[in-house]
């Protein structure tokens, strides 16, 4: 039942000659381990479905790595973009649409006393750490989680990635969730630290929010700013993001992925006393006021305000998680659904961790074959309706049954797919 990938393979081979990696985004590189079943190219999407270069259809749970909150080609959002396109994309002075969007964000994001825009998640994070440094007149930052590719966030790979080694003196990394490491670093360097930047939730099993709440307490105690990297959680866990969901009050926060249903825009927001630093130095880029993405963000957030979008993401996620538990039970697999419903997963839980990895790999491989696009975490959009979840669960059960059989046969030859 091998899927023919000839067109895709040829295209990829040609792309590799011209484009290092063959693509732009790490997570969109074809995974050699899935070569047999994973599509290399997606040509279109509608609702919760996508189609590959071979014309094969998938129910998509990856959602372009997070940005598609409402669904692909969501009419109201795309119509707002079309209407703005008639007026123009970018102008020689600010556009009134900037204030319109800022007002919306101020209204729905708890700590957004002031708001500025950028294009990507890492831009927003970079802007926030610059702000924190400007305000505190301190140089060092602590990071916790993935915050993007820029130098400040990539010191651990230095010097092989071109990042100057000297940055290691200015950036210390707290493995996410390790509060004792945070405490130690803060005590050791406290008067040098401008901010701690952390993701609120690492899409894993600890869904308590206790780490981020403890970080908030600790940073306050030492007069250090807390920057919440909500690039993934913002507009997804709740309209006001993880700060609303967990009830934490960061000094500054960054939002990007889910705010405009796939259009490229990010925002950095926070307390007036920190954000107003921006009046005193230059933080600027030509495209930050690009209006098509702003129109998309206004439409997306307006829909989220008007309709039960987040209730739906949670309800469909919970349905999926209940289904995972039932499948594990039916097939006698040691495993359970874990994580938060908007991004859950099935945790294989035998004492043999290598077996768990093999089974997970084979399950994803077979899910691609079934026409379900997912790796690791299952992201839900507003376009995943009950029927889509139920069809997915049928496919997931078949895929897991085949994975169990394949594990017996292929045990010796399976390589871990982790990258
Ligand atoms: C939590 C978090 N922060 C920052 C980023 C970087 O965002 P971008 O790729 O838009 O620059 C990502 C991207 O995956 C992310 O998940």
Image (tube, rainbow, N blue to C red):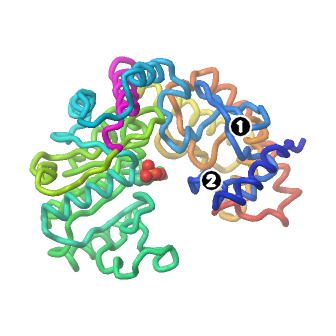
Mark linked to residue 209:
none
> Residue 300 colored magenta?
yes
- Nearer to us in this view, 268 or 245: 268
Q: Callout 1 environment at 10 Å: few (<14), some (14 to 19), or many (20+)?
A: many
Location of residue 72 in the rendering, given as x and y in whole percent from the top left corner: 56, 28
Q: Please say if 47 is above or below 139.
A: above
Which region is colored magenta? 287-308
Q: Residue at x 46, y 25 (%)?
A: 312
Asked if residue 37 lies left or right of residue 372, the reply is right
Please name the residue that numbered disc 1 is placed on: 396
Which numbered disc, 2 or 1, marks the residue closer to the eye?
2
- Counting residues from the start of the chain, the first of labels 2 and 1 encountered is 2
Q: Which residue is mark 2?
A: 23
Q: Residue furthest front?
A: 92
Q: Is residue 348 magenta?
A: no
Instruction: In the rendered view, tell whether residue 82 sits above or below residue 219.
Output: above
Mark 2 lies on a secondary structure that is: loop
Query: Which one is in front, 166 or 225?
Result: 166
**Pointer 2 with pointer 1, Cβ within 8 A:** no
Q: How many marks?
A: 2
Q: Position of residue 298 (x, y in %)?
A: 34, 26
Q: Please name the residue shown 40% across and 28% down the image.
A: 296
Residue that appears at 70% across and 65% down:
354
Q: Say which quadrant the C terminus sits in.
A: bottom right
Magenta-drawn stretch, dominant element (helix, strand or loop):
helix
Quarter of the N terminus within the rendering: top right
Disc 2 to disc 1, how far (Cα)? 29 Å
- The answer to whether any part of residue 206 appears in the image is no
Callout 2: 10 Å neighbours few (<14), some, many (20+)?
A: some
Pinpoint residue 357: horizontal percent, then vertical percent. 68, 59
Q: Say which element carries label 1.
A: helix
| Left or right side of 56 for 250 | left
């Amino acid at each position: 039942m091998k899927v023919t990938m000839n067109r895709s393979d040829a295209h990829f081979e040609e792309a590799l000659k011209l484009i290092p990696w063959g693509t732009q985004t790490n997570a969109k590189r074809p995974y050699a381990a899935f070569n047999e079943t994973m599509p290399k190219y997606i040509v279109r999407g509608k609702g919760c479905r996508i189609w590959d270069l071979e014309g094969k259809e998938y129910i998509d749970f990856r959602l372009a790595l997070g940005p598609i909150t409402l669904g692909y080609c969501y009419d109201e959002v795309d119509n707002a973009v079309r209407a703005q396109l008639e007026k123009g994309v970018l102008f020689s002075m600010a556009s009134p649409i900037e204030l319109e969007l800022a007002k919306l964000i101020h209204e729905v994001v708890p700590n957004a006393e002031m708001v500025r825009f950028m294009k990507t998640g890492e831009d927003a994070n970079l802007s926030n750490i610059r702000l924190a440094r400007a305000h505190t007149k301190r140089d060092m930052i602590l990071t916790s989680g993935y915050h993007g590719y820029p130098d400040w966030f990539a010191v651990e790979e230095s010097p092989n990635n071109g990042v100057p080694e000297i940055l290691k003196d200015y950036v210390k990394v707290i493995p996410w969730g390790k509060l004792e490491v945070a405490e130690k670093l803060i005590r050791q360097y406290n008067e040098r630290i401008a901010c701690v930047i952390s993701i609120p939730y690492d899409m894993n099993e600890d869904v308590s929010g206790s780490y981020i709440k403890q970080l908030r307490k600790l940073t306050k105690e030492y007069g250090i700013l807390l920057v919440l990297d909500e690039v993934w959680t913002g507009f997804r866990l709740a309209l006001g993001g993880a700060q609303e969901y967990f009830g934490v009050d960061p000094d500054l926060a960054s939002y990007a992925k889910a705010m405009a249903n796939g259009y490229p825009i990010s925002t950095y927001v926070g307390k007036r006393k920190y954000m107003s630093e921006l009046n005193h130095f230059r933080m600027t880029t030509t495209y930050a006021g690009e209006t098509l993405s702003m129109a998309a963000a206004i439409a997306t957030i307006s829909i989220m305000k008007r309709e039960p979008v987040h209730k739906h993401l949670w309800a469909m996620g919970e349905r999926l998680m209940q289904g995972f538990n039932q499948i594990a039970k039916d097939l006698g697999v040691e495993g359970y659904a874990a994580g938060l419903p908007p991004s859950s997963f099935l945790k294989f839980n035998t004492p043999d961790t290598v077996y768990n990895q093999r089974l997970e790999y084979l399950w994803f491989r077979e899910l691609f074959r079934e026409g379900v696009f997912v790796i690791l975490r299952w992201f839900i959009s507003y376009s995943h309706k009950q029927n889509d979840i139920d069809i997915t669960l049928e496919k997931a059960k078949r895929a897991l049954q085949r994975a169990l059989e394949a594990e017996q046969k292929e045990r010796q030859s399976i390589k871990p797919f982790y990258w």
